Image (cartoon, rainbow, N blue to C red):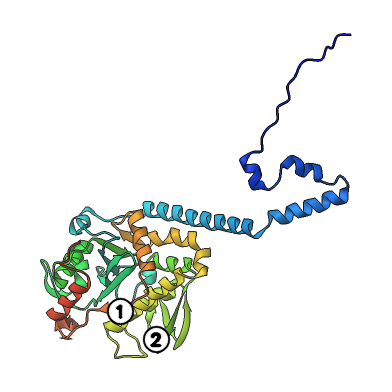
């Protein structure tokens, strides 16, 4: 009887490169697997323990952290894109030649123009002035801070000699930029400007979960928005509204001899507390909320990447101390005279006149 079976060939495959890395052949592992139920259950237990080994858990944790950071970055960029920028006049007043890698000068202004619920008695309807004036010289790994007292006696272009913070009332941030550049001298150029919004600042502090400050003496001030503001000596955890009031105290009944320098120190204390909070584990948990609120607190010429670069410089630039442009004498109308030598030292401190 003829053989009807078709002809066939037998092919044998060689072991793959990956099979050596796996340690054993998959088919051979299946052959050795017990067929009874208890053996199958034990095998599944071993597979589960292998699935939760430390290396796998570390990879899962790394991907979760990376995803959280990317989400926060996307939220930050979106918020920065939706936030308002500056006027063309401000853009023309800026130098714009600095770099966040090699060094750039940023003028940070806090105007006393604010909503009624945050206003001090008697300030309603008055033009806003620069409540705080801070210069930042930032580069990767380094941040220099110079605080200019708002009562410093300066020449305001087109307005004559007055307190330096009046420039904001006469011509907004553009005139304030020109006034600060002329006042410091030495060829100082301001590349970017940031205006802090008092309306949104409390929400930014609240997104961080508040800040911690330590007081050497008590504070008792005039009401803010109709509410009295008092703090005892010692440690305090401040919410957004309290942090704003703390930074803006003008006359402290607990220390009647305080002047604008004490106020500048409190503002520096708030900045240091914000930086400390940003570096805490609690801020990482709140990072998307912080990333959304931070750009909305500011009005600036910086776009999202530039603003992010500034924040990174501040975080990585060390806590450092803020240098105050110290007055040498009292001037007319309660102003403060700052000597030319002191201003020249400040210009060198900010890198004025050096190659960019």
Residue 165, position as x, y percentages in the image: 22, 72
Give the structural element (helix, strand or loop) at label 1. Answer: helix
Quarter of the image with the N terminus is top right
Q: Residues within 10 Å of mark 1 (few under 14, many from 20)?
A: many
Taking the spot 43% from the left edge, 73% from the top edge, the residue there is: 276
Q: Relative to residue 84, is residue 329 depicted above or below?
A: below
| Residue 153 in view of the camera | no
Q: Is residue 68 left or right of residue 13?
A: left
* Most foreground residue, 148 or 223: 148
**Residue receiving disc 1:** 264
Q: Residues within 10 Å of mark 2 (few under 14, many from 20)?
A: some
Residue 107, position as x, y percentages in the image: 26, 66
Q: Relative to residue 174, is residue 77 depicted above or below?
A: above
Taking the spot 63% from the left edge, 47% from the top edge, the residue there is: 21
Residue 303, position as x, y percentages in the image: 32, 54
Taking the spot 21% from the left edge, 82% from the top edge, the residue there is: 326
**Residue receiving disc 2:** 219
Q: Are marks 2 and 1 in contact (CB under 8 Å)?
A: no
2 or 1: tag closer to the N-terminus: 2
Residue at the limit of the structure toward the top, as seen here: 1
* Most foreground residue, 132 or 101: 101
């Amino acid at each position: 009887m003829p053989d009807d079976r078709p002809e066939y060939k037998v092919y044998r495959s060689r072991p793959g490169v990956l099979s050596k890395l796996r340690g054993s052949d998959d088919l051979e592992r299946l052959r050795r697997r017990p067929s009874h139920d208890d053996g199958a259950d034990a095998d599944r237990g071993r597979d589960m323990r292998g699935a939760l080994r430390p290396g796998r858990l570390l990879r899962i944790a790394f991907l979760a952290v990376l995803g959280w950071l990317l989400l926060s970055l996307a939220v930050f960029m979106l918020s920065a894109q939706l936030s308002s920028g500056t006027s063309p006049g401000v853009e023309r007043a800026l130098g714009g030649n600095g770099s966040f890698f090699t060094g750039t000068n940023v003028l940070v202004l806090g105007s006393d123009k604010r909503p009624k619920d945050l206003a001090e008695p008697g300030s309603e309807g008055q033009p806003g002035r620069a409540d705080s004036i801070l210069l930042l010289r930032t580069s990767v790994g380094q941040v220099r801070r110079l605080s200019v007292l708002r009562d410093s006696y300066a020449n305001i272009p087109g307005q004559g000699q007055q307190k330096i913070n009046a420039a904001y009332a006469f011509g907004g941030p553009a005139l304030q930029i020109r006034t600060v550049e002329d006042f410091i001298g030495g060829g100082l150029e301001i590349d970017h400007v940031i205006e802090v919004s008092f309306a949104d600042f409390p929400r930014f502090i609240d997104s961080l979960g508040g800040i911690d400050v330590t007081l050497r003496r008590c504070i008792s001030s005039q009401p803010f928005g109709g509410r009295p503001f008092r703090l005892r000596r010692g440690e305090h955890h401040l919410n957004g509204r309290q942090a704003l009031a703390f930074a803006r105290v003008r006359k402290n009944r607990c220390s009647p001899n305080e002047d604008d320098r004490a106020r500048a120190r409190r503002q520096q204390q708030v900045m240091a507390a914000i930086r400390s909070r940003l570096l805490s584990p609690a801020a990482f948990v709140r990072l998307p909320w912080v990333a959304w609120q931070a750009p909305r607190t500011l009005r600036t010429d910086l776009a999202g990447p530039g603003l992010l670069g500034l924040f990174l410089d501040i975080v990585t630039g060390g806590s450092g101390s803020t240098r105050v442009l110290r007055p040498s004498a009292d001037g007319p109308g309660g102003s403060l005279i700052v000597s030319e030598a002191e201003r020249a030292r400040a210009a060198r401190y900010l890198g004025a006149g050096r190659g960019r």
